[in-house]
Image (tube, helix red, strand yellow):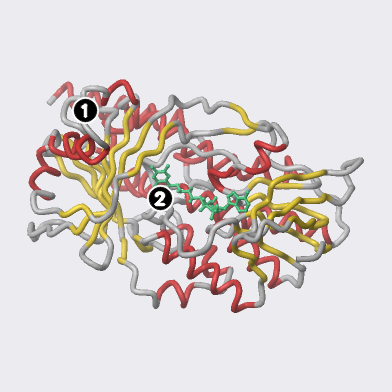
Amino acid sequence: PRDINIDVVIIGAGPSGAIAASLLHQQGKQVLVLEKQHFPRFSIGESLLPYCMQFIEQAGMLEAVEQAGFQFKNGAAFRHNGTYTTFDFTEKFTQGPGTTFQVQRGQFDKLLADTAVSQGVEIRYGHQVNDIDLGQNASSTSILTVTDEHDSVYRVTAKYVLDASGFGRVLPRLLHLEKPSNLPARSAIFTHIEDNITDASFDREKILISVHPSQKDIWYWLIPFSDGRCSVGVVAEPHLIEHCQGDLKEQLWQLLNEEPGLKALLSNAKVLQPCASLKGYSANVSTLATSQFALLGNAGEFLDPVFSSGVTIAMQSASMAVETLIKQLDGNEVDWQQDYAEPLMQGVNTFRTYVQAWYDGRFQDVIFYDDPNPTIKQMICSILAGYAWDTNNPFVKDSERRLNMIVDLCRDHNKAS
Ligand code: FAD
């Protein structure tokens, strides 16, 4: 390939890259996506939140997603020591979509990327970004060094770079923006199974989050797909699962069997692919965006998988970055900190409050509380459905204080009864 010159280059064709590319293309901007792998490729992160459907619609991809035959999802279910509780996402405080899908990411990401291509976006698969030169000053064009699958090296000169490289974290690494996460390093072990679940009460339209019976900060996901399969995984700090022997499959099964509900549900399950593990995936950065580049989705901060917020944050960041970038490309003054980073972090920080409170037990007390105030439940439900940027919701705007207020109420009530 020959060197080229373009308005915007996007690194990575996952959900954040595909949505950003489509939105920019719609606005008449020249955009090129460089993706190092070939699709479909496996990715973890299979349970979507209703809020992200708005971005899929904005990008003109809703029809394609609705017709793809993915598993319909309308909420989240939680279980701990026999207590089972559900959140129906259609019963939420904030207006907007209340349902979504549980998706095999190989298929889903390919669908979004193919739809972007059908709209006119160019995606180059097998092209890996290896280096960046930001030029002399803050208004310089940037030059990316790219290697294609035949090991040919070429350069892309762009007015702006969107890093949508996910856990590849291309710009954070190349520009030394990486910062440790303030969350402890946790590990996840996971696989796909043919679930063979016969229990008629099992709700395939919800993600099931189960809590370990004696260790509250170990939890499991069970995400049903539409084809009789499920994604299953466990998350824990590594020292808590040191007692597990054998290979990843044996470790995963030992941990699943420690939770009686899952043990019963999955007694006939058949593992379909090698178990995989990810360690220390939480990450942060010192800078999210400048006049030359912005980090989208996981290339920026990644918190934790417990509330399935990853793809939603990825798409929200794509939509917000594109809005700011269009202004800049059209010659307007923009402040990337104020126009992009701060509003994005509003929602990320809301999720952070609830993630931290999940692991220290406060939010679990709220989730498993058996007599919730209906309005408060709708406000919590909004956040679980992904609406973490709606500052009309007091549990978003003032998350820590509001949460602590209801934690106290739930704990007082539990003590009294
Ligand atoms: P990705 O989807 O990771 O895409 C990045 C792309 O960039 C990849 O295709 C990669 O090949 C490409 N790339 C990387 N480096 C380069 C390079 N040098 N050059 C060119 N291309 C490159 N999220 C949810 O929403 N729901 C869940 O249920 C959920 N569960 C999770 C469970 C676990 C254990 C973990 C760790 C995460 C989970 N997530 C979940 C988070 C989710 O995986 C991510 O947030 C989401 O995939 C981010 O999308 P993205 O577009 O930022 O990046």
Residue 349's disc number: none
Q: Residue at x 66, y 37 (%)?
A: 172
Foreground: 39 or 136?
A: 39
Q: Position of residue 16 (x, y in %)?
A: 57, 56
Amino acid type for the residue under numbered disc 2: Ile
- Residue labelled 2 has its Cβ within 8 Å of some atom of ligand 1: yes
Disc 2: which residue? 44
Quarter of the image where the N terminus is located: bottom right
Residue that extends furthest to the right in the rendered view of this protein: 136
Q: Residue at x 60, y 64 (%)?
A: 125
Disc 1: which residue? 244
Q: Residue at x 22, y 34 (%)?
A: 251
| Side (left or right) of 212 relative to 393 | left
Compared with 21, 333 (above or below) is above
Compared with 1, 377 (above or below) is above
Q: Residue at x 82, y 50 (%)?
A: 142
Q: Nearer the viewer's eye, disc 1 or disc 2?
A: 1
| Side (left or right) of 243 relative to 380 | left
| Image quadrant in which you'd find residue 343 | top right
Compared with 335, 361 (above or below) is above
Q: Position of residue 332 (x, y in %)?
A: 86, 56
| Side (left or right) of 68 relative to 333 | left
Q: In the structure shown, which secondary structural element does the residue marked by tag 2 occupy? A: loop
Amino acid type for the residue under numbered disc 1: Cys
- Residue labelled 1 has its Cβ within 8 Å of some atom of ligand 1: no
The reply to whether callout 1 and callout 2 are in contact (CB within 8 Å) is no
Label 1 to label 2: alpha-carbon separation? 23 Å
Q: Position of residue 290 (x, y in %)?
A: 77, 42
Could you classify mark 2 by the number of other residues whose Cα lies within 10 Å: few (under 14), some (14-19), or many (20 or more)?
some
